[in-house]
């Protein structure tokens, strides 16, 4: 049960909350400082 | 180990912010995701360790395909291919490495039940460092991974935006999810 609850919490819920943040996208060019 | 894998995925997100977190979280559990249908089909098994009643840390896992070293490499390639098409080479490499990290972390906790070759052919050793023999130490290691990953994620998240609200919510959910998952695992559910 811990495994399935973990998948639900981390992949679905945390994943969706994370997607609200303005992270760079996978194909965005690398910015070097 | 369940929560510890997720902790590592969060730490990787902090270093590789271009890779979607949900994909990292799925990658870190990919071996166990594939294990589930094989378990239901009685191809792979999970039994209590000798002299124990099962529960956290007290299982011998006969996952001779999904948790063999060669099998894990194959599953990592299988996971990375769609990512290569969708997100490019770097993200695919990161996700493939995260899939393989599952095998490495499991190597630390498992008893000698992780074969090198699929099917665990006779004459080839199975490996595992057996931290699960000390369940408290294994649980502390998992908790440390969750806290380390969450801290790294928080640092990276607040660097992405001045509005800290969404970063707080995502980090809080990450931490709560880690505690809930580890707690359920410790309870043997």
Image: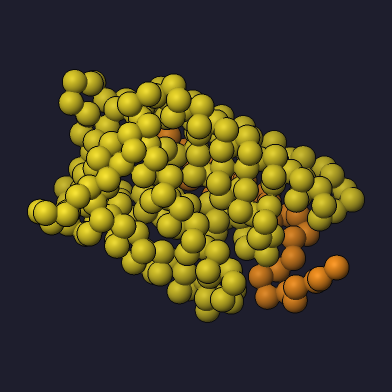
Chain colours: A orange, B yellow
The part of the image, by quadrant, that contains residue B100 is bottom left
**Observer able to see residue B3:** yes
Between A10 and B74, which is closer to the camera in this rendering?
A: B74
Report the residue at 63% width, 39% height from top.
B148
Image height of B126 relative to B86, above or below: above
Q: Please state the total of marks drawn on the protein image.
A: 0
Q: Is residue B91 above or below residue B164?
A: below
Q: Quadrant of residue B91?
A: bottom right
- Residue B37 pos. (x, y %): 27, 52
Residue found at the very far left of the displayed protein? B122
In this rendering, would B152 be left or right of A12?
right
Task: From the top left corner, tell me how far across and down residue B168 is, in percent.
Answer: 77, 40
- Residue placed at 50% from the left, 57% from the top? B98
Q: Quadrant of the N terminus of chain B?
A: top left
Q: Position of residue B173 (x, y in %)?
A: 65, 38
**Residue at point 22% right, 59% down?**
B117
As drawn, is B122 to the left or to the right of B47? left
Is residue B125 toward the left or the right of residue B103 in the image?
Answer: left
Q: Does B166 appear above or below B80? A: above
Whether residue B110 appears in this view of the structure is no
Q: Residue at x 39, y 40 (%)?
A: B108
Report the front residue among A27 and B147: B147
In the rendered image, the quadrant that contains the C terminus of chain B is top left
Horizontal and vertical percent for residue B14? Answer: 68, 52
């Amino acid at each position: 049960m811990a495994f399935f609850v973990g998948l639900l919490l981390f992949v679905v819920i945390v994943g969706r909350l994370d997607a609200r943040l303005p992270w760079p996208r996978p194909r965005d060019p690398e910015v070097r400082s | 180990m369940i929560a510890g894998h997720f902790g590592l995925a969060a730490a990787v997100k902090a270093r590789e912010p271009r890779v979607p977190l949900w994909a990292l979280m799925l990658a870190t559990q990919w071996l166990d995701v594939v294990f589930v249908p094989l378990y239901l089909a009685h191809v792979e098994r999970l039994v209590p360790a000798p002299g124990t009643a099962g529960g956290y840390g007290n299982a011998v896992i006969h996952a001779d395909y999904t948790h063999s070293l060669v099998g894990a490499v194959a599953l990592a390639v299988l996971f990375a291919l769609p990512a290569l098409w969708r997100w490019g080479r770097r993200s695919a490499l990161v996700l493939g490495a995260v899939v393989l990290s599952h095998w490495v972390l499991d190597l630390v906790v498992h008893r000698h039940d992780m074969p090198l070759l699929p099917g665990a052919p006779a004459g080839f050793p199975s490996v595992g460092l057996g931290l699960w023999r000390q369940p408290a130490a294994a649980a502390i290691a998992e908790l440390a991974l969750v806290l380390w990953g969450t801290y790294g994620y928080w640092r990276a998240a607040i660097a992405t935006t001045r509005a800290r609200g969404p970063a707080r919510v995502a980090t809080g959910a990450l931490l709560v999810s880690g505690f809930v998952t580890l707690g359920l695992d410790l309870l043997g559910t």
